[in-house]
Image: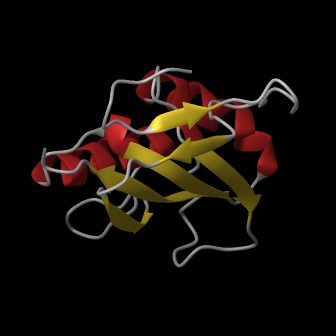
Amino acid sequence: MSSAPGEAVRVMSERLSTPIGNFVHAVEVPAGSGLLYLSGMTSRAGDGSVMHVGDAGAQTRRILQNMQTLLGERGLDLGHVVKVVVYVSDMSDLDAVHAVRREFFVDAMPASTLVEVSAFVHPDMCVEIDSVAYIPSAA
């Protein structure tokens, strides 16, 4: 995969198996760039309530929208995300989660890990995503 000078390079190796989800094998961050670590995000509304109870796809959509908002406040977008860790409460939600991720990560896919966990901080949550984005160097 190619990229413009100063942008993150998405790495896909032909010697490794093709990812089954919407991600790349690795992401090389350009020298001189900074990193922004986003805490685990869930589908909580502003009042703290959990949105989209029982719907992993809708929770994923809300989380990615929240990530867009936070990144936008820093002058970044989802194309700057180089790594995500997706936590799900039920691996059978994998297809729903990946379908939504494909809507948001089209060309600039991040490196990714997906893990099933036994519980979240609130029982109505079924997805949480933490991530790392790069901050391009000022040229």
Asked if 47 appears above or below 127 in the picture, the reply is: below
Q: Quick one: which residue is furthest to the bottom in this view?
A: 121
Q: Is residue 21 left or right of residue 10?
A: right
Q: Would you say residue 90 is visible in this rendering?
A: yes
Q: Residue at x 47, y 21 (%)?
A: 106
Q: Residue at x 71, y 41 (%)?
A: 93
- Comparing 107 with 46, the one in front is 107
Q: Residue at x 42, y 28 (%)?
A: 104
Asked if 59 appears above or below 11 in the picture, the reply is: below
Viewport quadrant of the C terminus: top left
Q: Quadrant of residue 77?
A: top left
Q: Is residue 2 left or right of residue 64?
A: right
Q: Would you say residue 55 is visible in this rendering?
A: no
Residue 81 percent coordinates (x, y): 41, 46
Residue 18 percent coordinates (x, y): 81, 26
Q: Quadrant of residue 26?
A: top right
Q: Residue at x 69, y 39 (%)?
A: 25
Q: Is residue 15 left or right of residue 65?
A: right
Viewport quadrant of the N terminus: top right
- Comparing 118 with 38, the one in front is 38
Q: How many marks?
A: 0
Residue 97 percent coordinates (x, y): 61, 37
- Comparing 58 with 111, the one in front is 111
The colour scheme is secondary structure
Asked if 35 appears above or below 56 in the picture, the reply is: below
Residue 132 percent coordinates (x, y): 43, 58
